Amino acid sequence: MKKIAFYFLPFLLLSMVSCKVEFSPNAEWKDVPVVYCVLDPDDDTVWARVQRCYLSEGNLYQYATVVDSNNYPEGEIGVHLLAWRGLRGSNNILTRTDVLMDRWILADTLRYGKPEGGFAGGSKPIFYCVPNDGLERDSNCIFQLVVLKNSTGDTLAQSYTTLVGYGSRTIRGGDTIEEVLTSPNGSRGREFGYRVGCRGELRWNTIPRGRRYQPTITFFYRKRGDTLSVDIPGSYVTDPNNNLTLSSSSITQNRFLSYIKNALRDNTDTLYTVNNVDVNIAVCNEDLNAYLNAQEAYGSAGNGQLYTNIEGGIGIFGSRRSHITVNVPCDSIGKPGYLPQELINLHVGFYGNWGE
């Protein structure tokens, strides 16, 4: 199973106000689902976290001390993922022309949640399925997530989303290569570096339904015969209208070097530079982008708004792609006056090119 990352929707959502669902934390008891599910066709497993809020009247923090009070009892709900072939209309309304292509019933398991602090807990129920190549095969479908009450078959919550699409592909050797990154790109003789006028610029082809692009450079170095790495995130670019302008960004040399220095500041070993870096472009669709934008606005302005696309509840059902990675040569390594000297000046033990 591939290594994946997923996040539980925090119980602190109870203190926020949804832009679609209004409620008071001290309202009378009401069972409202809180749903978090992000699809990624590059992951082999789909995870969905479903819990509930509106516990009761009274102090919210008192109810946080009740074990599993925000979880549905085992077997009370079922979670289904459906793929529909058709056009996504206003309000995601399906029509008679839509055809059900796939249905997955998510199994439930236990995984550890927040380990310490407020709202900490032990193992928490989470739902999952392994769609194999279903997500990639149905990349142009409308995906529907449904939370059912098992005893009655009633729909407690549902939502719709579409996958981030794929860029153009080409066959190179025995591999199918996705042509997303255009510069740098080792296959075209374009390298990553900081020559005059370059400034670590990154360019890529836009991807269908992609709204937010987050570039990251993985810098590799050698230590006692092992190859290790440091990730340097760039500034994301986002556009809710997808008007094909999200095609470039840059990671400055100062940002590049400062991340390396901070990551290795306690290292006393002699380190060696490696002549290649990974360029990763993570992308999310319009639903997840709107959710992230609202979260960031809430954190900075405290305006009490939270984006949700869950009908009958609150939360997010969106999609991303997080494995668009290209390994490219770094043209600044091994050339006088470029990165090797800058790395040495960081005083973190760099000596030069590995093997020289």
Image: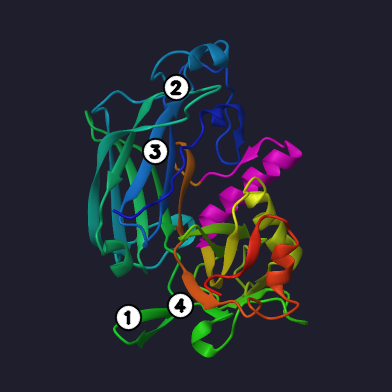
Callout 4 secondary element: loop
Among the two numbered marks 1 and 4 on one chain, the one whose residue lies closer to the N terminus: 4
The span from disc 1 to disc 3 (Cα, nearest Å) is: 35 Å
Label 4 packing within 10 angstroms: few (<14), some (14-19), many (20+): some
Mark carried by residue 49:
3
Location of the C terminus (image quadrant): bottom right
Mark carried by residue 167:
4
Q: Which residue is mark 2?
A: 30
Instruction: Say if mark 1 contacts mark 3, CB within 8 Å.
Output: no
Among the two numbered marks 3 and 2 on one chain, the one whose residue lies closer to the N terminus: 2
Mark carried by residue 270:
none
Above or below — where is 87 with respect to 169? above
Q: In the rendering, at what x and y percent does residue 249 appear? A: 67, 70
Q: What amino acid type should be assigned to the residue bearing mark 4? A: Gly
Q: Which residue is mark 1?
A: 175
Among the two numbered marks 4 and 2 on one chain, the one whose residue lies closer to the N terminus: 2
Among the two numbered marks 1 and 3 on one chain, the one whose residue lies closer to the N terminus: 3
Q: Nearer the viewer, mark 3 or mark 2?
A: 3
Label 2 packing within 10 angstroms: few (<14), some (14-19), many (20+): few
Instruction: Say if mark 4 contacts mark 2, CB within 8 Å.
Output: no
Q: In the rendering, at what x and y percent does residue 346 appear? A: 73, 58
